[in-house]
């Protein structure tokens, strides 16, 4: 029986630190690494990143879009990379950003099943079809010890166009955060009123044995933290560092010590490759800056 993702994440962070490194084999990076823009190039890129980092970083986050570019051969490469990364001790967060009606969502969530050929530890999902549509993914995650990160306030510049829109007196982003807070709250079921954040302030804010398995994505590029994360009870995936302009100082400014933050960096680390030592040094530089 697999322990809940939140607990496994907290353990990984305790022993390896919170850094997540993204595996994003962009065509430009393949070129810079002297690799062909093909499934073979992506395989060599993935192997190099996994070999260099899966033994030391807490989380690796492959971006499925870069594998789907090469059809079934690309997915076979990803499947192999995911298995190797997990075997080396890294948690694998599949950046797939899936979202659909509930019955289809159940199929997407199969990536979390223990019998899936490309089983991952957690995946990113999109809430655009409404919180209720995501429930089958929550059920699968609970059953198989998996985790979910729901897009709440993403790192792209025009994200607020939709995410700031109001639903009653709350922003769309806040509705997402409140929904995830519900998933992390023992005893809460769909249809119950959402838990009052004020009453949940003592739910874990940092990493610990009670870290929940359900998290949100909040970009490190935000000018201000315009969602209330109190009582979330689960992790916050923070992309946007490095290539998108976010810094460790931004993480501190936005989150302080009020959240269990998993900062994630792709291009800024991957650009150091293909040399394994250089990749490790680039990841360590971020890890040290985060720990300082
Ligand atoms: O709000 C979001 C959600 C996901 N991402 C993904 O993270 C990486 C970022 O790559 P960098 O090279 O570090 O910019 C990429 O896979 C995005 O799809 C995000 O950037 N923002």
Image: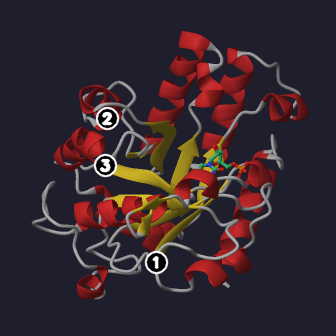
Q: In which quarter of the image is the C terminus?
A: bottom right
Instruction: Name the image colouring.
Output: secondary structure
- Where residue 193 sits in the image (x, y, percent)? 17, 66
Tell me, yes or no, whether the two marked residues, 1 and 2, touch with CB atoms within 8 Å. no
Can I make out residue 229 in this image? yes
Give the SS element for disc 3: helix
Residue ID at (37%, 64%) = 168
| Between marks 3 and 2 in the image, the one whose residue lies nearer the viewer | 3
Q: Give above or below for 198 relative to 218.
A: below
Is 234 on the left-hand or right-hand side of 160?
left
Q: Give above or below for 292 relative to 114.
A: below
- The residue carrying mark 1 is 259
- Where residue 149 sits in the image (x, y, percent)? 42, 53
Tell me if mark 1 has few (under 14), some (14-19) or many (20+) residues whose alpha carbon lies within 10 angstroms of its own: many
| Between marks 3 and 1 in the image, the one whose residue lies nearer the viewer | 3
Disc 2 within 8 angstroms of ligand 1 (CB): no
Tell me if mark 2 has few (under 14), some (14-19) or many (20+) residues whose alpha carbon lies within 10 angstroms of its own: many
Residue ID at (31%, 38%) = 112
Give the SS element for disc 2: helix
Is 16 on the left-hand or right-hand side of 280?
left
Which of marks 2 and 1 precedes in the sequence? 2
Q: Give above or below for 50 relative to 245.
A: above
- The residue carrying mark 3 is 131
Is 181 on the left-hand or right-hand side of 281?
left
Q: Distance between the residues labelled 3 and 1?
A: 22 Å
Residue furthest to the top: 72
- Where residue 5 sits in the image (x, y, percent)? 31, 56
Give the SS element for disc 1: loop
- Where residue 33 sits in the image (x, y, percent)? 86, 34
Disc sitting over residue 109 in the figure: 2
């Amino acid at each position: 029986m697999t322990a809940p993702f939140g607990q496994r994440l907290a353990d990984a962070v305790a022993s390896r630190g919170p850094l997540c490194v993204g595996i994003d084999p962009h065509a430009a990076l393949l070129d810079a690494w002297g690799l062909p823009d093909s499934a073979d190039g992506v395989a060599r890129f993935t192997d190099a990143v996994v070999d260099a980092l899966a033994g030391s970083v807490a989380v690796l986050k492959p971006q499925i879009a870069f594998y789907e570019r090469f059809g079934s051969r690309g997915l076979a490469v990803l499947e192999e990379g995911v298995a190797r990364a997990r075997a080396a001790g890294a948690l694998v967060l599949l950046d797939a950003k899936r979202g659909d009606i509930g019955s289809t969502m159940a199929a997407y969530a199969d990536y979390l099943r223990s019998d899936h050929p490309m089983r991952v530890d957690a995946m990113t999902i999109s809430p655009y079809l409404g919180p209720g549509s995501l429930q089958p993914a929550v059920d699968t995650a609970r059953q198989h010890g998996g985790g979910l990160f729901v897009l709440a306030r993403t790192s792209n510049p025009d994200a607020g166009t939709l995410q700031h829109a109001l639903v009653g007196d709350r922003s769309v982003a806040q509705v997402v955060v409140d929904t995830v807070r519900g998933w992390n709250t023992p005893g809460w079921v769909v249809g119950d009123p959402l838990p009052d954040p004020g009453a949940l302030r003592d739910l874990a804010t940092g990493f610990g044995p009670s870290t929940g398995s359900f998290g949100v994505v909040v970009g490190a590029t935000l000018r201000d933290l315009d969602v209330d994360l109190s009582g979330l009870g689960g992790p916050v995936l923070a992309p946007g560092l490095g290539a998108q302009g976010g810094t460790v100082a931004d993480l501190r400014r936005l989150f302080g010590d009020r959240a269990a933050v998993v900062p994630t960096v792709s291009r800024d680390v991957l650009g150091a490759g293909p040399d394994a030592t250089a990749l490790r040094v680039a990841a360590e530089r971020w890890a040290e800056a985060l720990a300082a």
